[in-house]
Image (cartoon, rainbow, N blue to C red):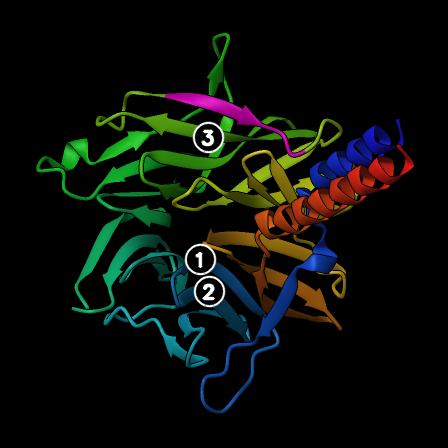
Amino acid sequence: MRARLWISGMVALIWAVTTVNSSAVSYQTVSYWDGSTTSSNTILTGISGDLVVGNSNYEGIDQGFVYSIQSQTFSAVSIGTPANYVQAYGISGNQVVGAYGDETNSYGYILNLSTSNLTVLDAGTRLYGISGNYAVGVRNDSESFIYDIGAQDPDLSYFTLQFESNGTSYATTVRAISGNKVVGYYDVDQDDTRGFIYTFTSDMKVGTFETFEATEASTVTQIFGISSDDKLVGNYSEGSTFNSFLIDGAEKTDLSDPDASQTNINGIDGEKAVGSASKQEQTVGVIAQVPEPTTYVLITLGMLVMAVSRCKARFSRQS
């Protein structure tokens, strides 16, 4: 009987450790430095391998940048044309997407870091994510779309994406794409926002929606990023406080920096998630290193095996 209790307890512990809290996550802070000035407002928005993109706001002007984790160096995103601001939101390989603007309009762009080739979309657009031949963004801050980069006919480049249920359409915001999966959120009403995953076939116009809520009690769930292995990151609220999350299959990790009053997580690649945190009246970029839950499971399995072996030895001696 005691042996069974030991085993039951250890199995329960295995299930428990697959949920990792923020105390097991390490955080690196990043503040944009242009060579002479350190910004007090830095937001990281996307990650691909060693490279991270983000935005810094200095004296009211947004400047997008690329940051190398390995070399810890910044490079301002330059589009080669006059602009009031340049923002960087997403990255995949050597392709960066974002928006730049003048006094009247914003323009979504795709910038190849290797060749400096620049693709500019229509006025009123912003791009948030890119993967392969597709990018996602919004038009006029209200209409979400998937953009087919290789479309021969410009009129067929855009596909408007809007969440619908039972004949009702909802305000929809796309934020990221990985492969054939687009993520974002939609507003049911002013007090109810839910995440979604849109999975399409070889035709971006043919796909299905899946709704997502971070917790049963959450009133707001916003998915901001998705990785190539389908990990999801974003924010949720069960009241007045927002928390950041990582969902990896059935495993959930709290990514709220315990040293910050507010954390926003915007992107993920592998075991690194990026975003921003409010600390000491400043907004700093954060890179969260998430431990593999599998590691904890293996350790606990080892403990289980040892416990069972000891129980067997003990009961063998008693018999």
Q: Which residue is mark 1?
A: 46
Q: Secondary structure at mark 2?
A: strand
Point out the stretch of residues depicted in magenta: 208-214
Identity of the residue drawn at 38% across and 62% down: 49
Question: How far across and down, in percent of the image, does residue 216 sit?
Answer: 72, 26
- Quadrant containing the C terminus is top right
- Quadrant containing the N terminus is top right
For marks 3 and 1, the one nearer the N-term is: 1
Q: Tell me the amino acid under the disc marked 2.
A: Gly
Residue 273's disc number: none
Tell whether 172 sits left or right of 28: left
Q: Is residue 211 magenta?
A: yes
For marks 3 and 2, the one nearer the N-term is: 2
Question: How far across and down, in percent of the image, does residue 109 sit?
Answer: 28, 55
Do tag 3 and tag 1 residues touch (Cβ < 8 Å)? no
Q: CA distance from mark 2 to mark 1?
A: 7 Å
Identity of the residue drawn at 70% across and 58% down: 24
Do tag 2 and tag 1 residues touch (Cβ < 8 Å)? yes
Do tag 3 and tag 2 residues touch (Cβ < 8 Å)? no
Q: Is residue 51 magenta?
A: no
Label 2 vs label 1, nearer the camera: 1
Q: CA distance from mark 3 to mark 2?
A: 23 Å
Question: How far across and down, in percent of the image, does residue 297 sit?
Answer: 64, 45
Q: Tell me the amino acid under the disc marked 1.
A: Gly
Q: Which residue is mark 2?
A: 54
For marks 2 and 1, the one nearer the N-term is: 1
Residue 197's disc number: 3
